Image (cartoon, helix red, strand yellow):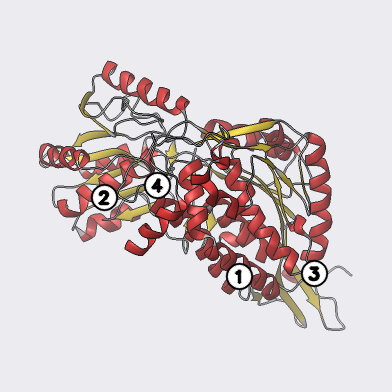
Amino acid sequence: MLGLRRAAAALLPLRAGAPAAAMSTLLVSQPRYAWLRELGLQEENPGVYNGRWGGGGQVVTTYCPANNEPIASVRQASLEDYEETVKKAKEAWKVWADIPAPKRGEIVRQIGDALRQKIKVLGSLVSLEMGKIFVEGVGEVQEYVDVCDYAVGLSRMIGGPVLPSERPGHALIEQWNPVGLVGIITAFNFPVAVYGWNSAIAMICGNACLWKGAPTTSLISVAVTKIIAKVLEDNKVPGAICSLVCGGADIGTAMAKDERMDLLSFTGSTKVGKQVALMVQERFGRSLLELGGNNAIIAFEDADLNLVIPSALFAAVGTAGQRCTTARRLFLHESIHDEVVAKLAKAYAQVRIGDPWDSDTLYGPLHTKEAVKMFLDAVEQAKQQGGSVVYGGKVINRPGNYVEPTIVTGLPHNAPIVHTETFAPILYVLKFKEEEEVFAWNNEVKQGLSSSIFTKDLGRIFRWLGPKGSDCGIVNVNIPTSGAEIGGAFGGEKHTGGGRESGSDSWKLYMRRSTCTINYSKDLPLAQGIKFQ
């Protein structure tokens, strides 16, 4: 860890408030940000890649959330660029699908190695453009690397069973084939990892990918694609296998409505995800949705508070409350409520707030000014609905989009604001008495992403994991709601969208299944013993 922190010093900008170089208002042109050039970034960057770089759309500047200074700009895709890129990606797929899966896995392995070589500088860019702290930025790139490693092994394992046929002289098998072109729309909060979860698995399955990242993290999309493109070009396969179209809602809508998009993976808000789902369903297309989460931690009277306090702190405050798995509700048994609130408030007071590239910082800014406004609106609504702010609740007086991590008590479990996912570091602490009621309260929100209980009761643990327990896609015991491993399927139920990414059998979503019956006899028996003579 110390080595990682020392390495960060050479890669990251000076602290906010240092004198600016008198050559450009863009950070990329200032000497202290020269490390951005290692990622191939310039003042204006092409935002379209389909084997060659280009872009004829609007020029968009991205800003550093820690000081709201402009970093660099990206020329986004026009609809004409999008059309050309889809055509090239479909052509590239014809080449990629013919390459044996283990050889595709070898190329994905090389992508993982190329990311390893740039992990610190790419993690630095995540801190600069998204706003998460440096160790989280590096950790996010590491997640992509880990998924690449996972995908390499998976490339030698995907396939279907040989099933017993009821007919003599017949074989019954499942054949799995790539769907074709996978569209991947990612959100600002995990601008590297979510693309990695999707693309690494989709690629070993034999698919081409077309990526549209969030406009506010376009530089990250460009930098990652440059790394991937070099690997593809070095292997003499079409670069359009991993195409990029930076853009806004017009490009996203085009992807959702495009019948050539054989699968559309969308990560974002429930509101936009619903619109995407309807557009894809209207053409009977496939979608993979990773949407919102109103996640809860439940601590029972027998909980180990030495686990509860740091878990609640990390889950609620990590990434400044901007993870889809962030803990937004903390249910405490009435017998431990006051003690936990007091200890949690003391822990909140020790959180080191600062520039995300500072090695001592645990908590950075919100991503945008709009997010700050949403935070303030939510705090005000919580007060109006009967809540008491016992810690935080205000904007921090410093450059950038900083707000205080916030604890609110005294609200009923079904208060409207408690049932609203606010992408900010606000934790609603709620009292409960009985297991049955708190399990029901966990499940009463629209979303169903992540959940966790803290208890030593073995029976309670298995009731929590069972059919009358949590209805979420991630159901934890004695660990936080956030920090999922790549080996398991990631995703949730209800308004979270039902999609699954990364590990387990998530690969099946990127493929189509055929049930195949082969007659190797000279007879023609029919199933179910039917005679047709």
Q: Nearer the viewer, residue 121 or 464?
A: 121
Tell me which amino acid carries mark 2. Answer: Ser
Residue 118 image-quadrant placement:
bottom right
**Residue 357's disc number:** 4
Kind of residue sitting beneath label 3: Asp
Q: What separation in Å lies between label 1 and label 4 (alpha carbons)?
A: 29 Å
Give how far apart the Cα atoms at labels 4 and 3 are.
44 Å
- Mark 1 or 2, nearer chain start: 1
Residue 452 position, x and y percent, is 31, 50
Q: Which mark is residue 98?
A: 3
Q: Nearer the viewer, residue 405 or 115?
A: 115
Instruction: Check the picture and name the quadrant holding the N terminus.
Output: bottom left
The earlier-in-sequence mark between 4 and 3 is 3
List x then y, in percent, for residue 434: 19, 41
Nearer mark to the viewer, of 1 and 4:
4
Q: Please name the amino acid that badge 4 sits on.
A: Trp
Callout 4–callout 3 Cβ contact below 8 Å: no
Q: What residue sits 31% from the left and 25% below the top?
A: 397
What SS does tag 3 mark? loop
Q: Amino acid at mark 1?
A: Arg
Q: Which label is found at residue 302?
A: none
